[in-house]
Amino acid sequence: MKISIRYFASVREALGSGETIESSAPTLAALREELIARGGAYASALAHGKAVRMALDQVMSAESAPLRDGSEVAFFPPVTGG
């Protein structure tokens, strides 16, 4: 299935603004694992020790959220205000 991925803040600095990929990942967690498996900047920016938030179709979502063809996923670090 086609998944549109957008990256924000420090994740964007490491990986660029985004991409559209073909994936068979059933959940957000599986998609993150798939991207980490690419190695290099992906493994570093999305590593499990890093605080990374995810949104599915512009809604903050848990890692267990199911993906579907045409989903838009966003990865970004937690945001604090001041």
Image (tube, rainbow, N blue to C red):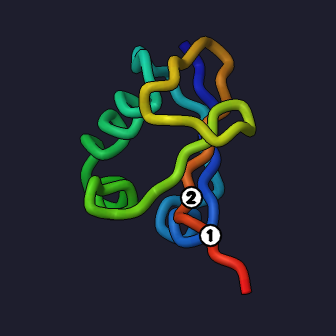
At mark 2, the secondary structure is strand
**Residue drawn at (50%, 35%) of the image:** 62
**Residue drawn at (56%, 58%) of the image:** 76
**Percent of width and height locating residue 36:** 30, 46
**Residue drawn at (64%, 42%) of the image:** 60
Which residue is label 2 attached to?
76
23 over 38 or under it: above or below: above
Which residue is label 1 attached to?
79
Position of 8 with respect to 30 (left or right) is right
Q: Quadrant of residue 45?
A: bottom left
Q: Quadrant of residue 2?
A: top right
**Percent of width and height locating residue 72:** 67, 32
Q: Nearer the viewer, residue 60 or 72?
A: 60
**Percent of width and height locating residue 56:** 64, 33
Task: Tell me if mark 2 has few (under 14), some (14-19) or many (20+) residues whose alpha carbon lies within 10 angstroms of its own.
Answer: some
Q: Are marks 1 and 2 in contact (CB under 8 Å)?
A: yes
In which quadrant of the rendered image does the C terminus lie? Answer: bottom right
Q: Nearer the viewer, residue 12 or 47?
A: 47
**Percent of width and height locating residue 19:** 60, 41
